[in-house]
């Protein structure tokens, strides 16, 4: 079963690469079919086998020999691993389906934010529609508490909104991402996600400054860190909360 989930994950991961490339260019993600961005060669089915095609082609276009970014197979692999991890922790459930799709969306949002420093409305709207369907079905089958999800959305939005307004250190798209993550995580876990995101972002920023990759006034995309905090919270959020609360109870 895990192999099937992994194959599904890397297959969808291949489509995520299309989204990451085309959305910032405002191109259709459906048409035209996948092609080499250098020579226009229309990729055949055997050119589109996730991960393996990259290996067989040695990272180059079959037609023009243009180098293909290693990011493509890494995105596919990452999505496959995430699907397996979510299935391991959530089993066969509504949450597994929707959290997997949402994780794929977060990969797209994060990759685009990292490259362009922008969060596109189309990705947020898709996430909102996905969240509404998830909450509706989850509440109907008594799998989730819709009030908790709505509170998570509001709190996630307000926390990042206030940080943006006070520090001017983040973009407006960041509180849209936080609100969206809150809809999927709920109140407790969005707090964990944002805490982790801020801590990891702080560590990453410090390393970047030490290595002088960017200057002190350079912008750093925060979306990927919210996404990372969100994924960790999906899997380990409750355990982190229990550890944190247990630590303070001892004192």
Image (cartoon, grey):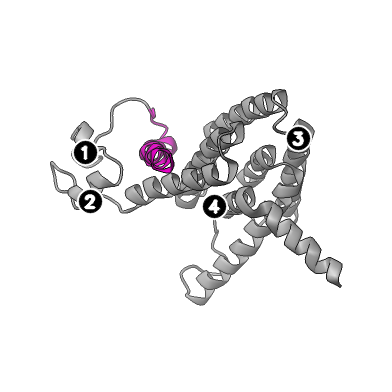
Q: Is residue 99 left or right of residue 52?
A: right
Give the Cα separation between the discs numbered 4 and 2. 27 Å
- Residue at image mark 3: 150
Q: Identify the secondary structure beneath mark 1.
A: helix
Q: Secondary structure at mark 4?
A: helix
2 or 3: mark nearer the eye? 2
Q: Which residue is mark 2?
A: 55
* Residue that label 4 marks: 224
20 to the left or right of 237: left
Q: Nearer the viewer, residue 232 or 180?
A: 232
Ranked by sequence position, the earlier of labels 1 and 4 is 1
**Residue at 69% in and 32% down:** 143
Mark 1: few, some, or many residues within 10 Å (few <14, many ≥20)?
some
Q: Which mark is residue 47?
A: 1
Identify the main secondary structure in magenta. helix
Cα–Cα gap, marks 1 and 4 = 29 Å
Q: Which residues are magenta?
A: 1-29
């Amino acid at each position: 079963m895990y192999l099937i989930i992994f194959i599904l994950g890397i297959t969808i991961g291949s489509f995520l690469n299309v989204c990451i490339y085309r959305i910032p260019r405002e191109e259709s993600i459906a048409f035209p079919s996948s092609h080499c961005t250098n020579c226009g060669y229309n990729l055949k089915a055997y050119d589109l086998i996730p991960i393996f095609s990259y290996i067989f082609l040695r990272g180059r276009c079959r037609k023009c020999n243009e180098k293909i970014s290693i990011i493509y197979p890494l995105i596919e692999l990452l999505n496959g691993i995430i699907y397996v991890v979510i299935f391991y922790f959530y089993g066969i459930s509504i949450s597994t389906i929707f959290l997997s799709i949402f994780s794929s969306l977060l990969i797209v949002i994060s990759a685009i934010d990292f490259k362009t420093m922008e969060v596109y409305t189309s990705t947020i709207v898709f996430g909102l529609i996905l969240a509404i369907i998830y909450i509706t079905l989850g509440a109907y089958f008594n799998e989730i508490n819709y009030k908790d999800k709505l509170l998570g959305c509001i709190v996630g939005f307000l926390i990042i909104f206030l940080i943006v307004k006070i520090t001017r250190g983040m973009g407006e798209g960041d509180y849209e991402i936080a609100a969206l993550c809150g809809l999927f995580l709920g109140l407790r876990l969005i707090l964990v996600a944002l805490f982790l995101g801020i801590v990891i972002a702080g560590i990453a920023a410090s390393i970047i400054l030490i290595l002088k990759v960017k200057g002190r006034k350079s912008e750093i995309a925060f979306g990927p860190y919210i996404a990372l905090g969100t994924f960790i919270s999906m899997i380990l959020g409750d355990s982190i909360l229990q550890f944190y609360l247990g630590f303070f109870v001892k004192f």
